[in-house]
Image: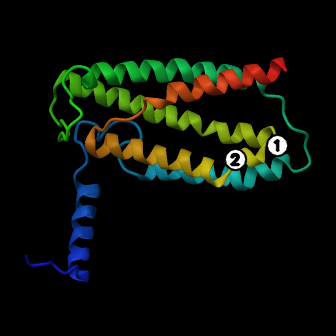
Amino acid sequence: MKQERVTSSGICNHFYFFCIFIFFSPDQRVKDWALMTSPKPLAAIIVTYLVTIKLILPAYMRNRRPYELRSLIKWYNVLQIISNAVVTWGIMTSGWTTTYHFGCMLPDYSMNPEALRMLRFLWWTIMLKLLELFETAFFILRKKDRQASFLHVYHHVSTLIIVWSALKYVGGKYIYFKIILYIHYLVKLSLTFQI
């Protein structure tokens, strides 16, 4: 059996086709939706988030006492539980429990109402990911800087990029564990206040 060599020209060709895919092959059904026209708005949001949590908020909180945000965080968690449940239900009933299977499937780029409904719920997933960026601000305003770790920030930025990319290019599938995560946050918060 002949073994193929990986060459720099081969890598460049793959990179070239990847760039063509990313910049010239977006899903035409979402190209005019808010935040979906290009990566620039998302990049601006991410840069603003990073500057805010790494520079602005720490400087603001340097000589201040921690804010008491229990009520705000409680309602934020309730909002996340309900929102993620609705979006998960929408995604599940837009293909996962009707026409999809767990094998390898190509993206559905049709104007099928079920496929379009999936895209709308994925767009709402992006909105929820944007809302989740406030969690880091809550940590910093409460002077819980340890919780705003590199891993925490990386998670929020990377999942936002992944979900945006899934909607922009694949009409992808994502969200299920978020409901459980926010139920955990709410229960943990409630137990903390009772002790």
What kind of element bears circle 2?
Answer: loop
Along the line of sight, which residue is nearer the eye, 48 or 145?
145
Q: Position of residue 80 (x, y in %)?
A: 56, 24
Reading the image, the residue beneath label 2 is: 148
Residue 152 located left or right of residue 8: right
Whole-angstrom CA distance, mark 1 to mark 2, is 10 Å
Q: Residue furthest left?
A: 1
| Residue at figure coordinates x 22%, y 22% from the top left | 114
Along the line of sight, which residue is nearer the eye, 90 or 44?
90
Amino acid type shown at disc 1? Lys
| Residue at figure coordinates x 51%, y 25% from the top left | 179
Q: How many marks?
A: 2
Residue 171 located left or right of residue 86: left
| Quadrant (top left/top right/bottom left/bottom right) for the N terminus | bottom left
Q: Position of residue 40 (x, y in %)?
A: 44, 53
The crowding category of the residue bearing disc 1, from other C-alpha atoms within 10 Å (few below 14, some 14 to 19, many at least 20), is: some
Q: Are marks 1 and 2 in contact (CB under 8 Å)?
A: no
What kind of element bears circle 1?
Answer: loop
Task: Answer whether residue 95 is visible to the viewer in this image.
Answer: yes
The crowding category of the residue bearing disc 2, from other C-alpha atoms within 10 Å (few below 14, some 14 to 19, many at least 20), is: some
Reading the image, the residue beneath label 1 is: 143
Identify the image quadrant of residue 88.
top left
| Residue at figure coordinates x 67%, y 19% from the top left | 75
Q: Residue furthest front?
A: 1
Q: Is residue 151 above or below residue 78?
A: below
Residue 152 located left or right of residue 36: right
Task: Answer whether residue 45 is visible to the viewer in this image.
Answer: no
Identify the image quadrant of residue 51.
bottom right
Residue 134 marker: none
| Quadrant (top left/top right/bottom left/bottom right) for the C terminus | top right
